[in-house]
Image (spheres, rainbow, N blue to C red):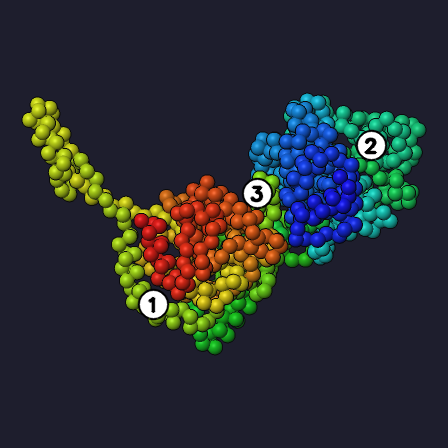
Amino acid sequence: MDIEALKTRFYELVAPSLPNEWDVEDALFALANGNSVRLDDIFSQVPAIWPVSHSLCFAYLSAADPVLHGLAPEELSLWVHTLLDRYETAGLHGAQLFMTEGQQHFVRHLRGQGGLRLTEIRPRLQPYVNGLAGTEMPLIASDEASTDTECIFLPHEIGLFADNTENFLLYKLMVSFQWASVQAGTFAVPPSLASSNASSHPLEELFADFPIPASAQSLYHLFETGRVLRFLQDELPGLMRQALAILPRLPLSADGVASRNLLDRLQLGLLRGQWPSGEASATEAHAWRLLQQCREYQVDNQGSIEAVRELMPLLSGDPDWLATDPLIFQGSLRLREVRNAQLKRRREREWRFIKALTLHLQQASPQKKHGAAEDRNEQQSAQSSQEADLAMVVESGNPPQPKSLPPPLTSLRIDNQEMALSEELTELAEQIRQDLGVLPEEYISSAVGKAGQGFSAVHPANQADGLGVFAPVVYDEWDYRRKGFRKNWCVVTEREMPLVQTSFIEQTLQRYKGQIRRLRHQFELLQTNEHFIRRQRDGNDIDLDALVESLADIHAGRPPSDRLFIRLAREQRDIAVYFLVDMSNSTAGWVGQSIKEALVLICEAMEVLNDRYGIYGFSGMRRLRCELFPVKRLDERYSQVVRQRIAAIGPKDYTRMAPAIRHMTSLFAQVEAKVRLLIILSDGKPEDYDDYKGEYAIEDTRHALLEAKAKGVHPFCITIDRQAHEYMAHMYGEVNSIFIDEVGRLPARMPEIYRTLTT
């Protein structure tokens, strides 16, 4: 088939987008001489790859013909599925490596001859590392081993040894080494390196002072590797005894080569015991001594830092002197990611400490709110006095060495009164002091101020658009074309709703006053579920059917039953429900107004029930900005604040519904209830700005609803539109949705729908 025919066929598959013609020709050039059967197989996968990445699709077309030489046609879709997974975890470069270097591994796996994959052994390794760390430390697939101190990154697959028992041992060594690097303090910041630059790790600034920063970092990492291996020998001697069988067999850059590279020769000595002979240069011999000293120095990383400072000036300016690949279990240093994780933990601890101390102060000495100016002046004066007292118990000045930290704080002196700290506060204060060296005075003064004003639990103390922003959560997205998930694809962030002062609530309550009264009466009848239980030994009334049968038994000469009564049984409701409200820009105007009125009516009516309920709004703008807005959390009281949030509901961006459904399902996972109900209010089909629309968006939303059902959540959708669409029955199911074509009927219908669903 000639190149023009191939281009025509390709454009038909990717319409309506029009890629650059030159890019298309370059990608299709390798296929110009392919046979028609093979071309059909190759082009059949284009619709699955093109929406994910145009560059990946071009790379696939260039490499697909050689791939099929090792695969049967029916195995190609599985190969493409793996390719897309690799792209989403390792980017375009990782996917290209898979298409070249990873091809043989894939074929070997299909034939049952492959190495060991992380996905296969993660269920065994994850509990192991969690036990070591004492907390959750997720294992994430990557190109090489590393850690950011919160997660551990490991290769997708290890096939270094023929025996997968040894491959598993290497995985275990990698995990243990990355954990030990954190525990032994490889990423710790000595006081002499403390920096206020939030954009980089202090160790990066140290290495930047040398002519070749990358060489200084590589040297530091190897010195630390010797120290961490010694740490593992002391902490996990059983593992290290097993590792002795594979350590000398690990690949090194200098294997079989008389390398002049200093790092190569240091690695040989560390793993193979090939220490320098009498022919070694003075600089090389000095490097061996420093490595031995670092292995024996177990206190912290200061010895490795000093060794780098001492050795780097002795080395030549040739970057090849220290240019080599790291050891396979050693991996790479991710100092920038470590810094980001450290700052995130620091903000988290600050927020938790201020919140806990604020609540502790409010419970210990509740204060009345004063409205008069003189009372406020007295309060400000008292606060100044309190802050002065705090200086007596908070360390100040330069952070001390960890070994000089005083005993844990168990009390604070505030306003000349000694206040005992809870166990939680004592633990948080100790974590902060271990990190910063001091317990900052502003943490305590901030809590003192909040205790007098009332604490607003916005987490953490980040602000964007005037709203509190919560930590983002990442979810997969279903791609029906490849029959698999796009891993870690959508980022969901909760944002605090603003509080607005309007007359909307009062007008709604006045407008529906009579209906609200009737609804409350109807909902009162739902508080308990009553039914009769027949054939009981005692009860409220006689069971006539049982009595007739008993008399018949007597006449027939059989022993009669004594179960002749009916008892009225009352069962308490155990229901938890979330209302998920569409806040896309298509709800502007009367639709949004009716949705808010419906929420007011349902809240007013449900106050007479014991059902737990929450309200969340959702909107989206691309996969990396899926937003949820908590209007009322599940255990939050229906208050004036909640009413103000309902009034603040307004149109935002697009309708990317599936991430919101998955987030609500994860919230339900923390809820114990017999009935868990998710009611969705939306005005149309799901879509987003980044080509998330049509069948793709419908199938993703449908799959998210199926995931919710599989986890015991019952979803139900109330759709507001001018006409019913065919996709609704497919997406929600025949009996899991209701269509309302007159938006003005929504406030009256919604309480009726809820009553029907829960009885």
Q: Amino acid at mark 1?
A: Tyr
Q: Nearer the viewer, residue 405 or 328?
A: 328
Q: Badge 2: few (under 14), some or many (20 or more) residues near its Cα, within 10 Å? A: some
The residue under label 2 is: 253
Image quarter for residue 643? bottom left
Q: Position of residue 10 (x, y in %)?
A: 70, 45
Q: Which quadrant of the figure contains the N terminus?
A: top right
Element marked by disc 1: loop
Give the residue displayed 44% in from the left and 46% down from the top: 733
Q: Position of residue 374 (x, y in %)?
A: 47, 77
The residue under label 1 is: 512
Q: Amino acid at mark 2?
A: Ser
Name the side, left or right, on which 222 lies relative to 346: right
Q: Badge 3: few (under 14), some or many (20 or more) residues near its Cα, within 10 Å? A: some
Who comes first in sequence, dot 1 or dot 2? 2
Q: Amino acid at mark 3?
A: Tyr
